[in-house]
Image (cartoon, rainbow, N blue to C red):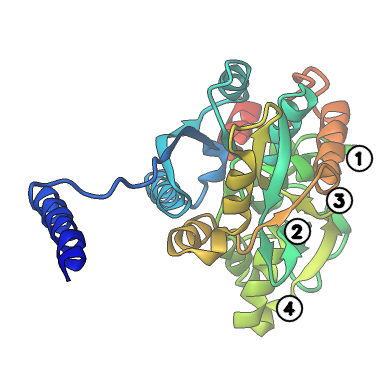
Amino acid sequence: MKLLRVLTLPLIWLSLAGAGALLAGDTPVAPALKKARLHVIASELLFSTVNSGDALASMRIWAEQIGKTRGFQFDTKMEIGRSVGQMRDSLKEHSVDLLVLDTTEYLALADAGLVEALAAGTSRGQLLAFPYLLLTKDGSEGGIEGLRGKRIVVASRLKSNLALVWLETLLAESKLGRAAAFFGSVENGYRASACVLPLFFGKIDACVVDTGNWDSIKELNPQLGRLRVVARSEAVLEGLIAMPVQPHPYQNELIDSVMNLHKTPAGEQLSLVFKTGVLVRVGKEPFESVRALCGKYRRLVNPSADGSSCPAGRLGETAAKERK
């Protein structure tokens, strides 16, 4: 009995001491967060129909969610990439960890040995790679040659203007000159409906649109199927997520977070903003059709262009400059 009292009193004292410490404000020590930098650059060429402020805000929320779920304390920075030169400098200075790029920019940076492709978006289980179509009214004759002096609207998916790049290359292959001189008027934009519907109602004579948007519009308006396809490009994949060749200290965790983007609320919101769907891993091959198109464009249309560049310039600016 005495022995029990001897053991019990110290235990009570220790319990009270522990409670007193907790009441005094001490708490159990939490596991230390891993400190890391997460600097993301998103190309301005991607923001044709996306609000850049909303996109950057969604990216920040996603980065914060990664930190909370994976035990990181991120030094986060989200930035708009204004040029390949700016992004090249950031990569050489090792001050960027993830890039959201237009394909033309990726090719220039990959050829310089600075980035590797990581992931690209999908739609209905397929990569977001679409051909561009040259459409005319049902019954139009003469193919592309018959469109001389006619009105055309060109709808590109992104600001890199691959729809215009392809159209200019198509004209050059047929020795028909530049778009601004060949057509009576060239209007440019990013909304497919502003291209297809005016063509259907006879307000313009031709339209360039990608098959992804074309198929969606036809599902809602089956009568549009009467429009005629005059020419079709190869399928082009126009955007991706890339990483610097130099690995991130927590590269595996970062890659896993990117590939499971659609499984978190913040990541799902980010996918909606960029309209990417579920992301899948990609290598170099899906982007070779863009490389081939850009090479043909430089060779046939603009031999004096920088060998690492492809864009034909802002669509409206290009037409205005050629008229001058």
Along the polypeptide, which appears first: circle 2 or circle 3? 2
Tell me if mark 4 has few (under 14), some (14-19) or many (20+) residues whose alpha carbon lies within 10 angstroms of its own. some
Q: Nearer the viewer, residue 308 or 210?
A: 308
In primary-sequence order, the first of circles 4 and 3 is 3
Nearest to the observer: residue 81 or residue 39: 39
Mark 1 vs mark 3, CA separation in Å: 12 Å
Q: Mark 2: few, some, or many residues within 10 Å (few <14, many ≥20)?
A: some
Q: Which residue is mark 4?
A: 225
Looking at the image, is 158 positioned above or below residue 97?
below
Q: Position of residue 77 (x, y in %)?
A: 42, 33
Of mark 1 and mark 4, the one earlier in the sequence is: 1
Q: Which residue is mark 3?
A: 145
Vertical placement of residue 93 versus 299, above or below: above
SS class, disc 1: helix
- Would residue 182 be visible to someone looking at this image? yes
Q: Is label 4 in a helix, a strand or a loop?
A: helix
Image quarter of the C terminus? top right
Quarter of image, res 52: top left
Residue farthest to the front, as pictured? 2
Tell me the CA gap for discs 1 and 2: 21 Å
